Structure formats: C-alpha cells, structure tokens
Image (cartoon, grey):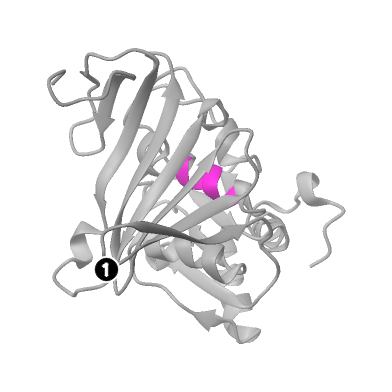
Amino acid sequence: ASDWSSDVCEYACSEEVPEPVPMGGKGFSVAFDPLDGSSIVDTNFAVGTIFGVWPGDKLVNITGRDQVAAGMGVFGPRTVFVFAVKGYPGCHEFLLQDDGKWLHVKETTEIGEGKLFAPGNLRATFDNPAYERLVNFYLGEKYTLRYTGGMVPDVFQIIVKEKGVFTNVTSPSTKAKLRILFEVAPLAMMVEAAGGASSCDGKCVSALDIPILVHDQRTQICFGSKGEVKRFEEYMYGNSPRFSEVTV
C-alpha cells in the first residue's frame, strides 16, 4: 500500500470493508465511502464519494468534530468536488472542466430557509408517528420533493441551493443504516461549515458530537438549515433547546 499512498496517510478505512488498512504514511487517517448510491447506478442518477480526515492513527473513540477536513465528489451531469477544512470558513465547490482542471465555482457560508425536502426511509412513517406528522407537514406546506435515494446528491443540494432539509430516521421496524464514520460525520462537517445544522442519533445534538466507538456504527440523521433542523427536533422529540432562538 505504501507504494502508492501519500506520505501523510497512516490508515484508510472503507465503508465496504470497515477495517483500517495501514497506508505507510504519518499524520492523518481517512474514512471513506467509495460509492455512495450504488443501488441507483443502474438508473443513471447522480452518485458520489464521501471522505473524512482525522488527525493521527485513530478512527474510533473520536468524534466528527475532530475531523480536520471532509469532502465529497458528486458524479452526475456535472462532476464536482466539495470540501470543508477545519478552521477555514465556508464549504467550497470545485467543478471539473473539459481540460481536466478544477475551477472553484462556489463558496457556501449560509443555508437559509426554503421549502425543499428529501425524506429518506419513508417506510418508517408506518410505525413512527412523529416522522409521519413531520412528512405530512412538508406535504401540507407544499414543500418541493427532491429525493433520489443517493445521500450525496440529496445532501449536496442543500449546500448548492442554500436551503432545504434531508431526513433519515428509524422506527421499530426499520433500523438505522447510515454510518457515522463514513457518511454522516463528513457530511455534517460540510453542511455545518456551509452554515447549516445537523441533528443526530435521536439526541438533539450535532452529528459532529456523537462519539464514534466502532467503525460500523450506524445512526439516524437530519441535515438542513438551522430552522429546518429545529423543526425536525420539535416534531420528532418535542423540543429543540439548541435552536430556541431560531424562528421557523
């Protein structure tokens, strides 16, 4: 592995095989989902890649807030690379040009309010009454439905459109399937760097603050504007102390 790795990567861990592989470098470790949206490849929808970078050699007993960088590639009608870096403002989008070069096309620092929703795991509405009420609110308020079944494009649209909400929750009959290390924590870093918010694990806390104890740890999640995440928490859990001053 050290023949082709960089000199700064100690371990790499893929969602496909969630065991860290030594890379021969020193300084950082990377967790990644190489192909998010594999189930929709045959339909020719947009798919993507997600990665998070942590300092040192640990990919457990960490949190998303420990990340030094996170990014995603989006492969659709356009090929774009989106990333956020700890301590650097905004979430940044680069577009692949015909000559193979990358052009910085957008910096997102604010996610506002807007009626755009991507409701994952709708099966949960059958035995999660709170989620059913929330989805019915979106429909009753005539939100625009934009959901592909690929987490990368469904979350990326919040950043590029600067509005909206993505939800994926559980119920007694539908268990959590989204992995914090490989998907949720890196996306949370980008969404929050862009000015949005997240709510994770049914605890009314940011996805960046959930302890990652095992590589394959799974969770439920909401990404969106601060107002939409507040609404999500109020519908799902009864209150939203973090966003008490946010008007929805």
How far across and down, in percent of the image, does residue 129 sit? 55, 64
Q: Locate the C terminus by quadrant.
A: bottom right
Establish if 52 lies above or below 22. Answer: below
How far across and down, in percent of the image, does residue 23 sit? 22, 19
Instruction: Give, as a three-letter code, the residue at label 1.
Output: Asp
Q: Quadrant of residue 22?
A: top left
How far across and down, in percent of the image, does residue 242 sit? 77, 44
Residue at coordinates 84% horizontally, 51% vertically from top-left? 244
Q: Which residues are magenta?
A: 186-192
Q: What crowding class fits label 1: few (fewer than 14 Cα within 10 Å), some (14-19), or many (20 or more)?
A: few
Majority secondary structure in the magenta region = helix
Residue where numbered disc 1 is placed: 98
Q: Locate the N terminus by quadrant.
A: top left
In-image side of 145 versus 199 (left or right): left
Residue 14 in view (yes/no): yes
Residue at coordinates 39% horizontally, 64% vertically from top-left? 153
Front one among 158 and 90: 90
Residue at coordinates 53% horizontally, 47% vertically from top-left? 190
Q: Callout 1: helix, strand or loop? A: loop
Residue at coordinates 71% horizontally, 57% vertically from top-left? 226
In-image side of 40 versus 79 (left or right): left
Front one among 109 and 214: 109
Q: Is residue 69 magenta?
A: no
